[in-house]
């Protein structure tokens, strides 16, 4: 039987879009190594609704 790895799948959600009050949301799915990055991820990704780069945080 295979051993479980350290990589887990996480969902990143736009923080600026929540505050804007517009309908919909921008989410990305990515993986992270839970040993190297135990805290929550925060990346700048493109938000197609706002049409600009925004901060996306792990939910």
Image (cartoon, grey):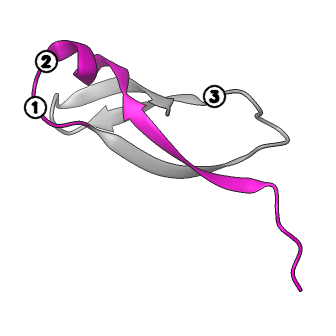
Residue 37, percent from left and from top: 76, 34
First in sequence: mark 3 or mark 2?
A: 2
Residue linked to disc 3: 40
Asked if marks 3 and 2 touch (Cβ < 8 Å), the reply is no
Identified at 82% across, 63% down, the residue is 5
Residue linked to disc 2: 21
Compute the Cα span from label 2 to label 1.
Answer: 7 Å
Identified at 10% across, 24% down, the residue is 22
Callout 2 secondary element: loop
Q: Is residue 24 above or below residue 18?
A: below
Identified at 35% across, 21% down, the residue is 15
Outermost residue toward the bottom in this view: 1
15 magenta-colored: yes
Compute the Cα span from label 1 to label 3.
Answer: 25 Å
Asked if marks 1 and 3 touch (Cβ < 8 Å), the reply is no
* Residue closer to the observer: 27 or 51: 27
Outermost residue toward the top in this view: 19
Q: 35 left or right of 30?
A: right
Tag of residue 53: none
Q: 16 left or right of 37?
A: left
Which span of residues is magenta-colored?
Answer: 1-25
Residue 6, percent from left and from top: 81, 55
Tag of residue 23: 1
Identified at 89% across, 86% down, the residue is 1
Quarter-of-image position of residue 42: top right
First in sequence: mark 1 or mark 3?
A: 1
Callout 3 secondary element: loop
- Give the total number of marks visible in the rendering: 3
Quarter-of-image position of residue 53: top left
Residue 29, percent from left and from top: 46, 51
Q: Is residue 35 above or below residue 55?
A: below
Asked if marks 2 and 1 touch (Cβ < 8 Å), the reply is no
């Amino acid at each position: 039987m295979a051993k479980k790895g350290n990589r887990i799948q996480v969902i990143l959600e736009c923080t600026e879009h929540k505050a804007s009050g517009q309908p919909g949301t921008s989410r990305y799915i990515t993986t992270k190594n839970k040993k190297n990055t135990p805290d929550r991820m925060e990346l700048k990704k493109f938000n197609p609704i706002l049409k600009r780069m925004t901060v996306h945080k792990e939910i």
